Amino acid sequence: MYFSLIIPVYNRPDEIDELLESLVLSDYDKPFEVVIVEDGSSIPCKNNLEKFVNKLDISYYFKENSGPGDSRNFGMKKAKGDYFLIFDSDCIIPKGYLSEVSKNLQNAYVDCFGGPDKALDSFSDIQKAINFAMTSFLTTGGIRGGSEQIDKFQPRSFNMGLSKKAFEASGGFGNIHPGEDPDLSIRLWNLGFETKLFSSAFVYHKRRIDWNKFSIQVTKFGKARPILNSWYPKYSKITYFFPSAFIIGLFVSLLLLIFNQDLFFKMYFVYFVLIFIVASFQNKSLKIGYLSLIAVWKQFFGYGKGFIISYMKVILLKQKPQEAFPELFF
């Protein structure tokens, strides 16, 4: 099996340096290629690749900006391998990652897999807090952090594997973003392919992001889910409503305080105290515990708000997703 690593990049040359440096340290003893797809960047990374020419088999392509999904498809069409490993440019790859993927595929082959993400000690406190919010069992059920508490895993393209056969059958990623990852997973299921979580094949996801960008990102995630539910109602789950219910419930609990009804508010208080304790313990930092409270609130509020707005427009009012949310489509 020959791996082709597909990495789209947009105005982030420094990230490519870190990612490729981590690949140089890989303990994988078989050949593999790295396909860099520059998605119309005004700050290209081509010059950053020169120092890796004799260390890695790298192909570089520049194309007009058309979004991450189309850029991944472009890279897979150019790639020579029969199995594609897809990363975001802000990932750092552990030296044993490729060996771990190879071992998993040998033990139980699957045409599409996803892996979790973790934070390095060198990450900023905000990055660690956001990582906690995105991966903790207390927030997302641990899905992105390596839990297998769902019957069908929907890989995320920051750490994803896809066979050439599955890519050609499905046509790859669609033009929605975010949401292109679960969209592809569902189309693969409908074509008879399986997806799986490789818990041990994790990457370090750096997420160069601030609070405002994080809020915008999770709000888009929330908007995308009702669209996917309208396209694929068979795969809609009650759990997708939880962030919205969480936010509505919090405001109701505050309203009930006016009538001296504090039970629900106490439940929310206990939950956030638990978030603080677990995040502080895992990161060995009270500051990160505090920042995790902010991250979790922004995650739930942003996703919940986006979900409600999208649900009303797409599900209730039957608006076309492309017209209701043009910012989600390339």
Image (spheres, grey):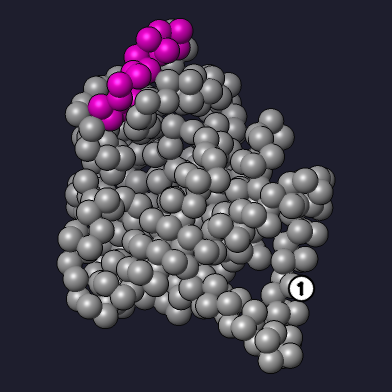
Residue located 48% across and 20% down the image? 14
Q: Quadrant of the N terminus?
A: top left
Residue located 77% across and 46% down the image? 287
What x and y, as percent, mark residue 147?
59, 61
Above or below, comparing residue 65 to residue 191 in the picture: above
Residue 39: say if magenta. yes
**Is 89 or 325 nearer to us in this picture?**
325
**Is 243 or 253 nearer to us in this picture?**
253
Give the residue type at disc 1.
Val
Q: Tell whether 300 sits left or right of 293.
A: left
Q: Tell whether 10 sits left or right of 294.
A: left
Q: Tell whether 270 sits left or right of 112.
A: right
Residue 88: image quadrant is top left
What x and y, as percent, mark residue 76?
26, 36
Furthest-front residue in view? 258
Residue located 36% across and 62% down the image? 223
**Is 70 or 288 nearer to us in this picture?**
288
Q: Tell whether 318 sits left or right of 213.
A: left
What x and y, as percent, mark residue 320?
17, 67
Residue located 58% across and 21% down the image? 25
Above or below, comparing residue 156 to residue 143 in the picture: above
Above or below, comparing residue 171 to residue 98 in the picture: below
What x and y, as percent, mark residue 278?
77, 58
Q: Is residue 4 visible?
A: no
Residue 253: image quadrant is bottom right
Q: Residues within 10 Å of mark 1 (few under 14, many from 20)?
A: few
Above or below, comparing residue 100 to residue 305 in the picture: above
From the image, tell me which residue sits under label 1. Answer: 270
Residue 222: say if magenta. no
Residue span colored magenta: 36-52
